Amino acid sequence: MHLKLLMICFLFLSVNCIYSQKTTNITNQETVSDLQNRVSILERTVSKMLTGRDTTNLTGINTLKVASGGIPIFNNTAVVFCARTNSNMGGISTGYILKFPTVITNVGKHYNPTDGIFIAPVHGIYLFYWTMQCYHSGNAHCGTALKIDNSLKGKIRSGENAGSYYHTGSSTVIVEVEAGEHVWIENVDYSSADIYSYSSFGGSLLSIL
């Protein structure tokens, strides 16, 4: 990855050098225009590699988009996770952040199975989903919500005043998330909820902004 970036930078500097010589020694306007176009393309290419988006020239580079280790953050950086519960959870109170300790996929390691929280690595458009298998008996309903820094973005409610039974509900949310914001699933509305194994929570980065 470093070698690829160095090659592009070298090519960029070489074309700039040729461009300077050409504009000094040649008056052919077509040649000058062609070189200007090539330099512009190279500038946009390098800018996109460093920032993850198209810019008109190198002045549009946002240095905060460049990783501290020097590796560029590409627009197609994989950020995806999927985790599930591995046992039944009973008597869950409202306001409790659900934990999904069994990790199936966690590319980028941005989901923490210990506390059930995903931390967005970059500003972008993300897709999140969650599926809950709940147990209901009488008035013991189940309500869960997707929250981003305590802001509610989606909710599932299930259960009726009936006999004991299992019920599964799921939802998907596509939302803009700022870098560093926390995303989690929280029990809401009903206390003493019972959530069973193989309930799941997952998400992925669709596009860097």
Image (cartoon, helix red, strand yellow):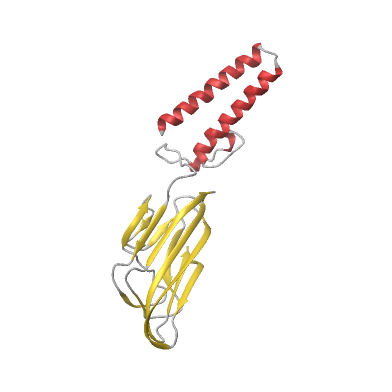
Which residue of the protein is positioned furthest toward the top in this rendering? 25
Left or right of 80, for residue 125? right
Q: Residue visible at 50% across and 38% down?
A: 50
The answer to which quarter of the image holds residue 197 is bottom left
- Examine the rendered structure and indicate whether residue 18 appears above or below residue 94: above
In this rendering, position of residue 14 left or right of residue 103? right
Q: Is residue 100 above or below residue 90?
A: above
| Residue nearer the viewer, 197 or 176 | 197
Horizontal and vertical percent position of residue 30: 69, 20
Q: Identify the residue at image location x=50%, y=63%.
A: 173
Label tally? 0
Q: Residue at x 57, y 22 (%)?
A: 16
Q: Position of residue 119 (x, y in %)?
A: 42, 56
Residue 174 percent across, percent down from the top left:
52, 60
Residue drawn at 33 percent across, 68 percent down: 198
Rendering coords of residue 39 (x, y %): 59, 26
Q: Is residue 35 above or below residue 112?
A: above
